[in-house]
Image (spheres, rainbow, N blue to C red):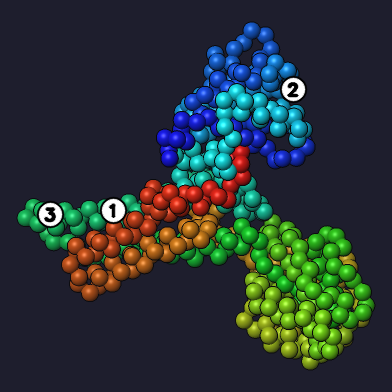
Amino acid sequence: MTDILYSNTIAAISTPPAAGGVSMIRVSGDRAVEVAEKVFHPVGSRKVSEMAGYTACYGGIYSGGKKLDDGVLLIFRAPHSYTGEDVAEITCHGGILVSRRVLRACLDAGARMAQAGEFTRRALLSGKLTLTQAEAVADMISAKSDGYLQCVSAQLDGALYRKISAVKQTLVDLAGEITAWIDYPDEMEEGFDYADGRKRLEACRSEINALLDGYGVGQAMKDGVSAAIVGKPNVGKSTLMNLLAGCERSIVADIEGTTRDIVEENIMLGGIAFSVADCAGIRETNDPIERIGVEKMRKRMEQSRLIFAVFDNSRPLSEEDFQLADALKDKTVLCVINKQDLESRIDKSCLEKRFSHIVEISAENESSLRLLTEAVKELVNPESLDVSSGFIANERQRDSAAAAGRAVDSALEAIAGGVTPDAVGVMLEAAVDSLSQLTGENASEQVIDSVFSRFCVGK
């Protein structure tokens, strides 16, 4: 498959398929410069075939002798390019039609249409990127928050690969010592040092555990923290939703049961991405439609990582309020006492006994957003993830790391039980294999296909 990929020159539009200032058509392969020369005519006497790498020129873009547009051509010579091959990038005006026509001109000149993620796949196959770095490329494109963008930037710089490689090298060295002891016992002055082996394995396990422990935080930063706004009717849940969303996302009315279904919105709060659901009010009702909404709310409440539990400052606590508080005992909850602009009739001491994080606001006042932001950052702390040290970014990586951790655990148990070193060596090899799958050094074609199925055409 690799030979087939490298015998072809591919092309695709690498900018979003929408009207804009400019668009860029990327061409990569052994005939990239030849294709560019057929399509792009530099101003003056300059020839595309004579352009050095990392140079650009201005000129016209043609197809069949007909001028399509003016633009800029950039040339990158192998191996000093993103894909490791010759690459030509033609920038034209950002109209959808003109972009497609320039792409068609490149295809007519000898390129073929690139598959999803094929440029980055070629970068992987040519050794320009590791598999974890390739995955970081896709994550960077879809990053939803500043915090996650910082994490992905470190990942793209090879932070996870370096951390995994260090652990793997320790395991390889230890397995090598065991092999030497088995193959050349007469030349080894001492037997296998179980105490030293256990110490080094425990250090490896600690590193793997740290990566696995950070997975949940990384996923929350990547996909957004799942949150739910809950409370009895008319406490101001929908007003709070609109404050967080920055627009009128939920219907606000004095009529109980106005919100009958879950209204969801993706928001940014304190640099953290959230997927927030405004849920139906908790109450007993004979309305079958409203009852369905209440049941949906209860399910969403169970699934959410953060709960905004809203209580009305202007009304005494009711049985429904106490039932809600009891249902949230094991959840991460921000207790929101709303309607501070009205006369207080609520017993705050009851809530203080049940919730450790309380914020008092008026959801109709935009200044309350700052108070909410500060309170949320105390509960959802993205700084617990060291953005510079690498992190487990997806289920594929997590499964490989977990398998390596189990193999290291088995090796530690074997050492504790006095099992012969050759058996320990087999377990170390299993751990090394799992870590190599994580970094992509021995990943199967099926795994690589799965990774690149996430990519768009043109990247």
Seen in the image, is 171 located left or right of residue 452? left
Q: Residue 187 carries which label?
A: none
Local packing at callout 2 (Cα closer than 10 Å; few below 14, some 14-19, many 20+) is: some
Mark 1: which amino acid? Val
Mark 3: which amino acid? Asp
Task: Tell me the SS state at disc 3.
Answer: helix
Residue where numbered disc 2 is placed: 69
Which quadrant is home to the N terminus? top left
- Mark earlier in primary sequence (3, 2): 2
Tell me where residue 443 appears, x and y as whole percent. Answer: 41, 51
Residue where numbered disc 3 is placed: 183
Tell me where residue 287 appears, x and y as whole percent. Answer: 84, 85
- Mark earlier in primary sequence (2, 1): 2
Q: Which of 273 and 188 is in front in this view?
A: 273
Task: Identify whether 254 is placed above or below 182.
Answer: below
Q: Which-is-in-front pick, marks 3 and 2? A: 2
Residue where numbered disc 1 is placed: 172
Mark 2: which amino acid? Asp
Seen in the image, is 17 located left or right of residue 285? left
Between the residue at mark 3 and the residue at mark 1, the CA separation in whole angstroms equals 16 Å
Task: Identify whether 392 is placed above or below 239.
Answer: above
Q: Which residue is drawn at 43% across and 49% down?
A: 445
- Mark earlier in primary sequence (3, 1): 1
Q: In which quarter of the image is residue 203?
A: bottom left
Between the residue at mark 3 and the residue at mark 2, the CA separation in whole angstroms equals 69 Å
